[in-house]
Amino acid sequence: MIYFERITENTLENALIIINSNSVYNILESGIPSRDIYEIKEQFLNQTTDSFLIKTEDQYIGLIDFMKNNPKDNCPWLGLLMIHGDFHFKGYGKTIYQSFEDKFLSEKFQKIRIGIIKENDQAKRFWTALGFEVYDQNPWEGKIVDCLEKHIHAKGVKAIE
């Protein structure tokens, strides 16, 4: 069973451990292999996004950061879905995303967007396999980001195009 637990001041250290278990991503994003607690606090304890640790039984295995409404395009955005490095390639990412998409559906979202640093081929393969499609590219902090989107609909209900 997968649980979503809101990140708080008391659980920030767990988020830091997960982030720093992914040094390849950290280098791709910021050029450095690890982050500090102050960066994590700024990223996950804010008024703009909802941030959750992902837990199975008694172990934290990942985190997810979500913006319900990006004021730039009035769409929901998934800012980050990260699995602890020790749990990569075990199917957790897909299972977690599907559980989270079910949450989106219950809140009546019709689409979800994400941004992927252009050089992050592994992430692009993961997200396109889940049904996301590239719709744009934009600059971000000196990098090019592929913008992807997925139209979602209630299970068993065919979307009308």
Image (tube, rainbow, N blue to C red):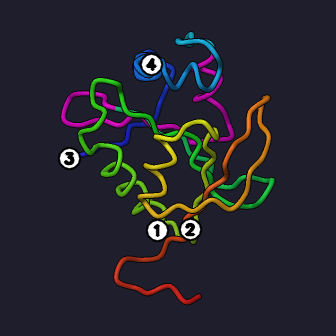
Q: Check whether the beta carbons of the residues at disc 4 and disc 1 lie within 8 A of each other.
A: no
Q: Residue at x 39, y 63 (%)?
A: 102
Which residue carries the number 1 mark? 105
Which region is colored magenta?
A: 39-61
User: Mark on residue 10?
Assistant: 4
User: Mark on residue 1?
Assistant: 3
In the image, 73 versus 103, the foreground residue is 73
Give the SS element for disc 1: helix
The mark closer to the camera, 4 or 1, is 1
Q: Amino acid at mark 2?
A: Phe
**Mark 3 or mark 4, which has the lower sequence index?**
3
Which residue carries the number 2 mark? 109
Q: Amino acid at mark 4?
A: Asn
Q: Locate residue 132, reporting x and y percent.
A: 52, 61
Give the SS element for disc 2: loop
**Mark 2 or mark 4, which has the lower sequence index?**
4
